Image (cartoon, rainbow, N blue to C red):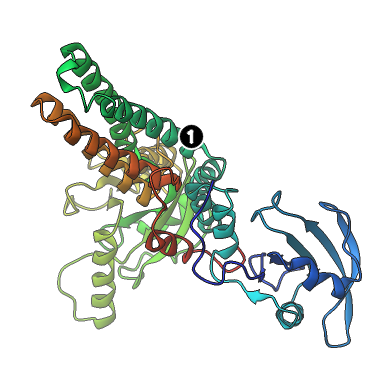
Amino acid sequence: MTRPRASQSPDSTIVGVATGTPDGGVAIVRVSGAEARAIVEPLVESLPPPRMLARRQLRDGQGAAEEALVAWMPGPKSFTGEDVIELHVHAGVRNVGRIVAALQLRGARAAGPGEFSRRAFEHGRLSLEQAEGIAALIAGRTSAAIDQARRLVAGELGREVEALRSAVGDLRAEIEANLDFPEDVADGDVSRWREELRRHEATARAWLQSFAAGQRARERARVVIAGPPNAGKSALFNALLGRSRAIVSPTPGTTRDYVEAELQIDGLEVIVVDTAGLRGATEDAIEHEGIGRSREQIAGAKLVLWLEPADAEPLDAGPPEALRVESKRDLGARRPDWLGVSAQSGEGLEELRAQIGRSVRGDEAAPWIGLARHRDRASEAATAMASAQALLERTAPLELVAFELGVAERQLAEITGRDTLGPVGEDVLGRIFSQFCIGK
């Protein structure tokens, strides 16, 4: 498959650090391009057999040498589809920097962001959504995000999209075959085309409906604990975490700023936030600032736990959509309709965790692994298919129907970067790969 060429010296040999940071125990320096062997081999005396990791003395060009592990992967059976050599060296910013500099002196060019992955795309080793999956895997901050990214890299989304793109393309070709003889098109053919289009549009719409669930799973929702002073917010915060993270005191106004921590609940990773107590006017400038920050946290929360204690009169002043929780239930119950908890005895904590999980997860059971760009293209494809159906209903010229199907096919093709209908634009590729790190 022919790919559009990278705009930055596509035929040059590039070098970059493939590991996340060069300050661990081992760093991997990757070289890719037609001159990879000529550049690297003089520094290691000889390359090992292809796809074998072997020990070599690596000279850094400044008279020093170190023991390194070297792997040589001739193209096209490599990550980028080009000749690739990886040097596994001792880490450290200065040590790795000297090795990279030695390779640059011999003719390698410093790789740009995502340039290795882009070359893999250009040589047909990765489809576009698989390359995006690599970036998502690196950036993943939750277990669900990592799982979804791995499925992207494995090509699961691409296979689904390609199946729909192929079906739409077949239908377009059938309709175009009838353009010269529209009088021969039977009502049964038109009905069948409409039914096929409805099924194809429904497939794309189903992806869009479950996109939000996938997005929620990739993000860490913010769960904010709010309420009046001395409601037991910090005690509940610590109880949910299972450790002492926030200061607990019977003195109202102890919490002056919000405190947050990561928490695993029902297989989800959330950020739980303890906030300053909310009350009316106060002359304490620091407390006033803390209350303002609490309101900001409430405004940005996925879920608010509004706490009022069992040893105080009901206020019920929290946001209407908040989950209402009566704390200090070991002291009694004044709000029988509220979820009762006790940080001291543990009463109600498991039920509260379960309720938090249900609220954060939402109702969708099958999250879509597509990213925002994929959602936008799928939405445009669904809109084009709906337009094609409307044209068939009005017995509009078949040329217009075929045009809309071509639009749908192109939008689906852009998800995977297939170029059967023309290359993906440089602006699209630039936006995608510029978000990658240097060594990927």
Q: Position of residue 9 (x, y in %)?
A: 56, 72
**Residue sitting nearer the eye, 102 or 132:** 102
Q: Quadrant of residue 278?
A: bottom left
Q: Position of residue 90 (x, y in %)?
A: 80, 72
Left or right side of 65 for 381: left
Mark 1: few/some/many CA within 10 Å (<14, 14-19, 20+)? few
Q: Is residue 201 above or below residue 30?
A: above
Q: Is residue 143 above or below residue 287?
A: above
Q: Quadrant of residue 248?
A: bottom left
Residue beneath the point at 88% across and 71% down: 44
Q: Position of residue 45 (x, y in %)?
A: 91, 71
Residue beneath the point at 61% across and 67% down: 11
- Residue projecting furthest to the left: 394
Q: Quadrant of residue 198?
A: top left
- Residue projecting furthest to the bottom: 62
Query: Is residue 336 at least partly visible in the picture?
Result: no
**Residue sitting nearer the eye, 89 or 170:** 170
Q: Give the amino acid at mark 1.
A: Arg
Q: Is residue 86 above or below residue 210?
A: below
- Say which residue label 1 marks: 159
Query: How many numbered marks does the figure carry?
Result: 1
Query: Is residue 272 at least partly visible in the picture?
Result: yes
Which quadrant is the N terminus positioned in? top right
Residue beneath the point at 77% across and 68% down: 25
- Residue projecting furthest to the front: 180
Q: Secondary structure at mark 1?
A: helix
Left or right side of 256 for 133: right
Left or right side of 194 for 409: right
Q: Position of residue 318 (x, y in %)?
A: 19, 53
Which quadrant is the C terminus positioned in? bottom right
